Image (cartoon, grey):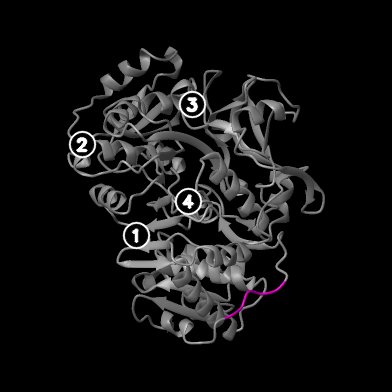
Amino acid sequence: MTEATQDRFWRGCIGETALETHYDGRRVRCYAERPADLATMVRDLVARQPDRDAVVAGDVRLSFADLDAQVGRIAGGLAAHGVGLGDRVALLLDNGWEFVACLLACNRIGAICVPIGIRQRRAELEFLLADCGAVVLIHEAALAENVPAVEAVPGLRHRFSVGGPSAGAQPFEALLTGEVAPQVAGIDAEAVAVILYTSGTTGRPKGAMLTHFGIIQSSLAFSRCLACTADDRALAAIPLSHVSGLVGIFYSTLIAGGALVAMRAGYKVPELLATAARERVTYTILVPALYTLAVMQPSLSDHDLSAWRIGCFGGAPMPEATIAKLAGLLPDLVLVNAYGATETTSPTTIMPPGLNPDHPDSVGQIVPCGRVEIRGEDGAILGPGETGELWISGPMVVPGYWNRPDANREAFVDGAWRSGDIGTVDADGFVKVFDRVKDMINRAGFKVFSAEVENVLNHHPQIVEAAVVGRPDPVLGERVHAFIRPVEGAGLSEAAVRAFCAERMSDYKVPEGVTLTVEPLPRNANGKLQKPALRAQLTEPTR
């Protein structure tokens, strides 16, 4: 796809761009007008709009001036405990004002923030804290049982507990009693601001290094493509410790001067709807299953959700029944598909608002300044419409993984990140993602993309979520097997599932086995489907 084609869809929201060299030789197109670093971005916002809402979290409401005051105190407290440029500060915190303030405090003093999902268990935490070399851990008191013992992570010098006492930890309030720390001078835009551990389903997680520069570039892409302004109010109902919550929601809204409305884990859909109505939420990123559950709520029509203008989603297609119901109940809501990864600092593609109905099988257009090449197994660049691996480059691609030169050599080639996803880019620049390379099913020589079958299943009005894996077979090699969580009380049968698929795809793609479950499908701490766990169920001996 040419830049002219790309600009055609994003004309009016790109702004001035320029070719620049970053990360020791990557030549990338960038937004020319941008904050120098994340701390400077916040400082300018506070000066421009001190009294506007910055964060709403439960009963706490902080203006930009209020938030800045808390950030300054926490930054001062961290500095007083010896935290400085490049030191790692880990956050085991739920969505809330403390998460946001600690994150921005790290930005202010040039420390590296390491957000960790609150579903991580002790053994996982031991690895993550040791791998990144964290010197400080700020954690929820309620999660104390998962915090490693002192001797397990000897490099962790200080621990602070939020929301109550915790053995071996100082109270969070101890960080708020020192002098306010000023912004450290001369933060390098290419310095690492955040380490986010990838949620790989096999092997040890890798720490992707998100820089000030990359976060700013990605935030500008989301903000400008979705026309975000200071009047926007974004709902964080997904974890801020995940790249979609951190960059796609928080930083992208912040860079436009908008407000964050944070919801803690464990909320129910009625609570989400009530919060969105009360706070006049305009922007969300949710998984398709949540939109489906929302339209099934009898109380949906009781809430004034007229301010809700953008509903982003990703990871799976939006069921047609959900789309139709949303159009009837919330006619001003525009659904926007997007695709990205931790390694791309969130968005690689965004569907231009309003075009989703015309391209239901696409994840959108490549973001301004981004680039996607489709390459074959030999690394050769393929043409429009040809299927291969997505190689992604641009200012949003991270410089690499923390202390993993081996993984860097494998995953990053000439400034491009090898995504491991199979897809196509058509002549108009619309991207389709079919599957992970490792998730492709080989049934008697026929290649079956599990994501393609999942896409069909997710359009069934009685299916909440679905996952497709290969079941080992001594004759065919693999057979297609589907794990399905149906709508409660739907009475869906295996035969009905197969019949639905048979009407919509080739016979060899139709699931030969179906497992129906009332439980949510297994996901890791970052919400990604754990297909190895599903495959294991198929190989366990029956009793």
Q: Which residue is mark 3?
A: 355
Q: Residue 116, percent across and down?
A: 49, 62
Q: Residue tagged by mark 4?
A: 249
Per the image, label 1 sits on a secondary structure element best described as loop
Q: Is residue 204 magenta?
A: no
In this picture, residue 190 sits left or right of residue 441: right
Kind of residue at badge 1: Arg
Q: Is residue 250 left or right of residue 463?
A: right
On the image, which quarter does residue 481 sit in? Answer: top left
Give the x, y percent position of residue 471.
43, 30
User: Disc 4 and disc 1: Cα gap in Å?
Assistant: 15 Å
Mark 2 crowd level (few <14, some 14–19, many ≥20, 10 Å Cα):
few
Seen in the image, is 41 located left or right of residue 521?
Answer: right
Q: Position of residue 22 (x, y in %)?
A: 77, 52
In front: label 3 or label 1 = 3
Q: Is residue 241 visible?
A: yes
Disc 3 secondary structure class = loop
> Mark 4 or mark 2, which is nearer the start of the sequence?
4
Q: Residue furthest right?
A: 25
Please identify, in this view, whether the residue under mark 4 or under mark 1 is nearer the observer: 4
On screen, residue 447 above or below 94: above
Q: CA distance from mark 2 to mark 4?
A: 30 Å
Question: Which stretch is magenta?
Answer: 181-185
Q: Residues within 10 Å of mark 1 (few under 14, many from 20)?
A: some
The front one of 2 and 132 is: 2
